[in-house]
Image (tube, grey):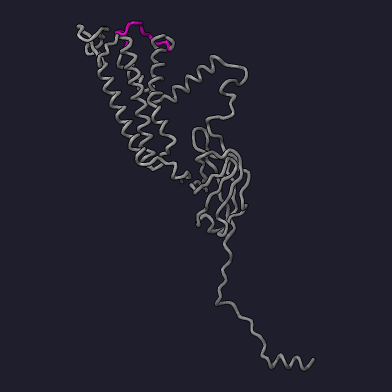
Amino acid sequence: MDTRSKSRRANSIQIGIMGAGLVCLALLLICLLVALWPQLYPKFPPPGVLGDPDVQCLVGWCPGPDARLLAMVMSAGGLGSFVHIAKSFGDFVGNERLMASWIWWYALKPFIGMVVAMLLYLFIRGGFLGVSVTGEASNVNLYGLIGMSCLAGMFAKQATDKLSELFDTLFLTREAAGDTRRKDDLENPIAYIVDAQPAVASQQATYICLRGVGFARGVRVQVNGEGRETTLADSTRLAFQLLPEDVARAGVLIVEVINPPPGGGPSAPLMLAVEGPAAMVDVATVVPLRAAPIEEEMAIYDHR
């Protein structure tokens, strides 16, 4: 169940502008890639100016083979990122869970893919990845290069994680330094539940408060594997609402706190006891108490 305030969700205007902008960017990158593709491939057009023979220009720009390859690689990286963000955008909008705070992530993701694709291209042309490529642009397999650039943009996170792993291995330090020492880690921690109040749930006590450590924004509570409405107070306190079927009979509920990605995940479970409903009394079977007649009471009093 979504625990975040509806006021933080992207409205229809923001969603419309974001969707239209992504489509326009994808069309622009496609047109750029097609316009830069050598018309006489594998022969690349020479650099020059408008009007020169055999020169292929784009809006007055007539690049040489190296500049043309670099621009094509970056365009392909942006298109690869578009595939990733378009799927994510469609999923979150379709489920009405797109938050306004994520709009800039969608806006910047294509440019991240462009830069990652460009870095990969430079590594290949420089020989760092062990791919046999000569310095001549005409000797580059353009189809393979563009396909690899699209994949680099589509899986930019995995590519950067792998590069980070590579450099961590090559330049290993003895102790944590730089970004690893910062206290404001960007990844959400795994929450830890200390206790619940009240400690025993019942039909009269279905609103449970949890006290713990590491509750992140967007946290949700699961009871027996199913989400429950959750309200976050701060990183150490939250509350959630049990459903009537949760407290219909005595037993134990498995309560987990799940922080959202990046990082996050389910906490160690808390066993929450449930008190059974109070026994119902059948009024028809109850024998009413009868008071003795007033004459009997007076007779008893006279004999004393």
Compared to 295, does 265 lie above or below?
A: above
Q: Is residue 104 magenta?
A: no
Horizontal arrangement in the rendering, residue 292 relative to residue 283 (left or right): right
Residue 166 lies, with reference to residue 47, above or below; the image says: below
Q: Main secondary structure of the magenta part?
A: loop
Outermost residue toward the right in this view: 304
Place residue 138 in its image quadrant. Answer: top left
How far across and how far down the image is residue 3, in percent? Answer: 48, 45
Residue visible at 57% across and 62% down in the picture: 277
Give the residue at x 38% y 29%: 107
Above or below — where is 282 with respect to 67? below
Camera-side residue of 282 and 134: 134
- In-front residue for pair 283/189: 189
Magenta range is: 129-140
Taking depth in this image into account, of 248 and 36 the one nearest to the observer is 36
Q: Is residue 140 left or right of residue 301?
A: left
Examine the rendered structure and indicate whether residue 251 appears above or below residue 266: below
State the count of labels.
0
Question: Residue 172's spot in the image, x, y percent?
Answer: 57, 16
**In terms of image quadrants, where is residue 286?**
bottom right
Q: Residue 135: say if magenta.
A: yes
Q: Position of residue 201 (x, y in %)?
A: 58, 55
The quarter of the image holding the C terminus is bottom right
Residue at point 55%, 14% (across, down): 171
Specify whether 40 is left or right of 77: left
